[in-house]
Image (tube, helix red, strand yellow):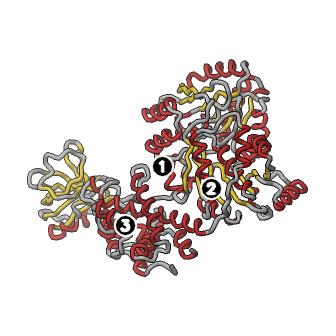
Amino acid sequence: MSGRPEQLFPLFAELETLQGVGPKTAEHFAQLNITAPRDLLFSLPYQVIDRRRRETIKGLTLPTTATVEVTVGQHRPARNKGGAYRIDVSDQETDFQLVFFHGRSRYLTAQLPEGARRVVSGKLELFDGTAQMVHPDHMVPLAEASEIPEFEPVYRLTHGISQKTIFKAVQSALTRVPELPEWIDASYKKQQAWADWHTALAAAHAPAGVEDLAQDSPMRARLAYDELFAHQLTLAIARSVEREQPGHRSVATGALQRKVLAALPYRPTGAQGRAIEEITAEMASERRMNRLLQGDVGAGKTLVAFMALLVAVEAGGQGVMMAPTEILARQHMEGLQPLAEDAGVVLEILTGRDKGKDRKAKLDALARGDIHILLGTHAVFQADVSFNALRLVVVDEQHRFGVRQRMELAEKGQRADVLVMTATPIPRSLALTQYGDMEVSILDEKPPGRKPIKTAIISTERMSEVVDHLRRAISEGRQCYWVCPLVEESEVMDLTAADVRFKQLRAILGDDLVGLVHGQMPPREKDAAMAAFQEGRTRVLVATTVIEVGVNVPNASIMVIERAEIFGLAQLHQLRGRVGRGSTESTCLLMYQPPLSEGGRKRLEVLRQSEDGFLIAETDLQMRGAGDVIGTAQSGLPRFHIADLEQQADLMAVAQSDARALMTSDPDLVGARGRAARTLLWLLRQDEAIRLISVG
């Protein structure tokens, strides 16, 4: 796998090697992330202009694009500077005008001499009752008319690049497309009636109508599948490299698990039982576990994770559980301490706060194996932290964590098993994209005793009623979260919004009853504000979305979310899950700023009617698109050029099973199809995968 296959060299050459592209144009192309001919080929047209010849423009509904043969009539140069230069022309049945602003007489009389026949093509509009074509896109002698494409593709442009430039460059790039060996499974390709790669690519750049631009047109579907297949193959390679590294066999004795189950005041749900069995079985195998535990808010993931950690301890090893923030690590500590006592295991926490002697004492105990289970933040992976026998790493809220970090973790963890927990219900298609290299356990039942949350949608114009409702609830001893919107992605403005609301609520409800938490606060102050709320000293916590992940305050039974219409559904569902954790009936008020659009209302209605996070996430995906659902910036989602995750979830599923099947039958990708697949990985710049194969 020494390097890029030679037949791909022309596609990765400099852009200047293409017709009509000089250094300046190449710089402009770079703005579109186009730096090689292959990038240009994967930037497909998004529209098509019908330039088929017609005899006359008579009877056309204007404005429209038309291509017609005309006889050139009288020239009428502009009367004043900057005015319009007009030329009368006539087709077989009617007359119209060609219009040029800043038109130069010498040029136009040479191009369009009176009495000559020309083919013109451009946008026709009606102006003062006269049909006009302003600055035609094409005006050529009859002999050259065949150069005007019947259907002209339209590309996305950037400053300094015209349609003509990009069209020419693409045509030039298409002449270098090699015939590559087929990487798609032959029977699947036949069943889909797909063309070869180079044929599909050429056809995608020569659409013969709007239907050819559709995501499911055979040419585009084939190219989309190539992208999804390459992506899934990358994940499948990562998965097989991870699996080839032998794991530890951690065989459960059940002794510690039984103690905890006996002490629990309730029985685990069926889903929890299944997940515990799947994890226990996989930890006992020779292979390293790499599993995602996906469960809705309040589905009881922490118990499942703790049972897995006990398997590591029963097998004579240690476990570590990592949370994204110190608050969450401490919360896990509070929740798990009683269970650890039931089982008789030593549980300890390590965060950035541990300094000096304390820290050293903990590190020594960890290295001796006196600490069985360690909780903490990223701090548990600093260089001086070493375990005696680390068997299992549990990572909480993984979407802040990518494949690469998982691999680093595993290296630190002496081939430890990895279990990732997420409370974000991820629609199947996105789960395949992000976690395609992992096995998945899903918790889809709520533990007994969780009361449903009442959700209401109300206008910000009724703010004073909401505050009255709050005042009453507080007098009954209840607590409330008040979430302020993220304004214009600017933290400074968020702060102002949260600050204004904080001051206003303090003025109404009393200074010492209202707390504030936002992203700009120093961690210490944030922790202090959270602690005051957790202990019930403050009754209302005004917050930006920093509280979305995991905080547990059973007494908080009201959630107010301002400007709910600008949040994602999955995010609203997460926020709502912060209440309804105690024995009281809980309410979530979604406040919107009128007027609410049709789509906005529809989205909020979904939340009002359902508490099923997976259903909500699917709806969110359909309504908003993939990047938004998990916040592309932090999602590590691949950027696909052609494939569309929302519309092509089914193709993604096929791509995953096909990629895994290929890796099983040809793990080193040395067979004919395996070698073709390597070419595809190079073609789609999946360098990560290529590095892994060459290492593997």
Three-letter code, disc 1? Arg
Q: Residues under labels 3 and 2: Cα distance?
A: 31 Å
Query: Between residues 531 and 62, which one lies in front from this camera angle?
Result: 531
Q: From the viewer's perspective, is the residue at label 3 or at label 2 nearer?
A: 3
Question: The disc labelled 2 sits on which kind of residue?
Answer: Phe
Q: Which mark is residue 414?
A: none
The residue tagged 2 is: 401
> Residue visible at 79% across and 52% down?
350
Q: Nearer the viewer, residue 98 or 64?
A: 64
Q: Position of residue 356 (x, y in %)?
A: 89, 56
Residue 24 appears anywhere in the view: no
SS at mark 3? Answer: loop
Residue at 42%, 52% in the rendered image: 649
- Quadrant position of residue 288: bottom right
* Residue density around tag 3, few if under 14, some if 14–19, many if 20 or more, within 10 Å: many
Q: Quadrant of the C terminus?
A: bottom right
